[in-house]
Image (cartoon, rainbow, N blue to C red):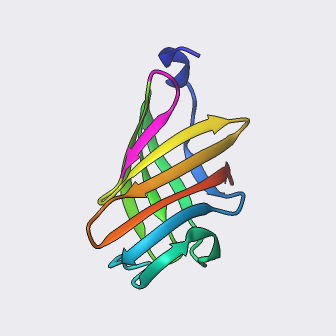
Amino acid sequence: MSSLAYSQVDLKGVWVQAAQPAGAVSGKSDAAHDNQTFTKSYTDNRDVQWRLEVIDQKGRAFHAKWCSADRCESVVDAFRSNGEILMADEDGVFMVTLENGLMDLCYAEPGVDFQIVGCQTLKRQ
């Protein structure tokens, strides 16, 4: 698919978890939605339910909110020419692919005191 074709993919709407997340987390989180300490923990046993709210899109770029039940963070996003999506919030980076109507989203937040990498599958609500 060409980059022009990706500019025609409408992502606006709410995307919710469609499968069990997978990932690893370590250190002390200071995030409002997850203020706790993790020691060699995994994301599949956490109670946080995430959603992506795509609120505006212009061609290959869009603005969205990445939300837990308690809090939303602004994210900015763009399609790469190969169809992958890159997103960034206030403290991390997302790598996203679309396939068969599902969004495979992975998040990475590097740091000295806290690190997380988590992947999950989202579907449009």
The answer to whether residue 87 is left or right of residue 125 is left
Nearer to the camera, 21 or 64: 21
Quarter of the figure that contains the C terminus? bottom right
Residue drawn 59% across the image and 16% down it: 1
Using residue 83 as the reference point, say whether residue 26 is left or right of it: left
Vertical placement of 57 versus 55: above or below? above
Residue at image position (50%, 22%) is 82
Stretch of the chain drawn in magenta = 81-88
Q: Nearer the viewer, residue 85 or 113?
A: 113
Extreme bottom residue here? 36
The picture places residue 12, in percent across and down from the top left corner, at: 55, 43
Q: Which residue is at 34% across, 71% downward?
A: 114
Establish if 113 lies above or below 7: below
Asked whether residue 86 is drawn in magenta, I would say yes
Expressed as whole percent of the image width and height from the top left, the position of residue 80 reads: 43, 27
- Please identify the residue farthest to the front as the structure is shown: 40
Residue that sits furthest to the left in the current view: 112
Membership of 39 in magenta stretch: no
Kindly indicate the quadrant of the structure image that contains residue 30.
Answer: bottom left
Q: Quadrant of residue 19?
A: bottom right
Percent of width and height locating residue 27:
37, 76
Viewer-side residue, 56 vs 102:
102
* 21 left or right, relative to 30: right
Q: In x, y percent, where is residue 42?
A: 56, 71
Q: How many marks?
A: 0
